[in-house]
Image (cartoon, coloured by chain):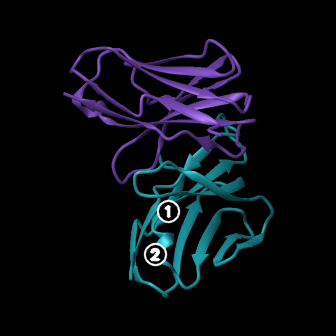
Amino acid sequence: DAMVIQNPRYQVTQFGKPVTLSCSQTLNHNVMYWYQQKSSQAPKLLFHYYDKDFNNEADTPDNFQSRRPNTSFCFLDIRSPGLGDAAMYLCATSRDIGETQYFGPGTRLLVL
Amino acid sequence: GQQVMQIPQYQHVQEGEDFTTYCNSSTTLSNIQWYKQRPGGHPVFLIQLVKSGEVKKQKRLTFQFGEAKKNSSLHITATQTTDVGTYFCAGRLNRGSTLGRLYFGRGTQLTVWP
């Protein structure tokens, strides 16, 4: 009964090679978030969608983009991954901003 | 700058000892949420506190929200090895341009020795 699904769970890419991570939800929540989490650190919010409205965090590099084609799906595109982009990427959803967030299992990205 | 501060960053306890983690914000919070992330896992929602001075309990876990709604704590009584993980607080600001979004604390990584 997975509610927030992320694929793949592990992704290996080469330096500079574009990569896309996907997230889907069965909760019909309005808000979808993408976080980057590095070892022993708090999740860092990259951006979020409220319905179709995209909200970027001020310190999110331009290298990171996102798409939300419909309510259920949201994608994270990394245009030119660098070694520093290796991390766990977490997708989360909430019914409304500030409400309980439901996290997916994450995609661990390795950049070679 | 970081909106929500959380201490300590690491805590190692013997099984049966108590554990407390603290969160503090310079800005009044609308609410505060607590999440637990097991090693290798993802954050899982534990509880939300909304009212000034609110105290909630979940078995051995006690959550408090300060009177000024700027600080919060999570206390675990008689820790067990199953309590191992990182505990995050996440505060929702009361005002500002990013009204409504959650700001995560850095987390407290709890290790319990059997």
Q: Residue furthest front?
A: A1
A82 to the left or right of A108:
left
Sort mark 2 into few (<14), some (14-19) or many (20+) by Cα contacts within 10 Å. some
- Judging by the rendered image, the residue that carries numbered circle 1 is B6
A39 to the left or right of B23:
left
Task: Tell me which residue sits at (62%, 44%) in the image.
Answer: B102
Vertical side of A5 occupied by B20: above or below: below
> Which quadrant holds the C terminus of chain A?
top left
The label shown at residue B81 is 2
Sort mark 1 into few (<14), some (14-19) or many (20+) by Cα contacts within 10 Å. many
Residue B112 in the image: x percent, y percent? 41, 77
- Chain to which the residue tagged by mark 2 belongs: B
Q: Colour of chain A?
A: purple
Q: Colour of chain B?
A: cyan
> Which quadrant holds the N terminus of chain A?
top right
Q: Are marks 1 and 2 in contact (CB under 8 Å)?
A: no
For the question of whether residue B28 can be seen, the reply is no
B102 to the left or right of B112:
right
Q: Say which quarter of the image contains residue A59.
A: top left
The label shown at residue B70 is none
Secondary structure found at label 2:
helix
Residue B27 in the image: x percent, y percent? 64, 54
Circle 1 or circle 2, nearest the eye:
2
Residue A34 in the image: x percent, y percent? 52, 31
| Observer-nearest of B5 and B15 | B15
Secondary structure found at label 1:
strand
The amino acid marked with disc number 1 is: Gln
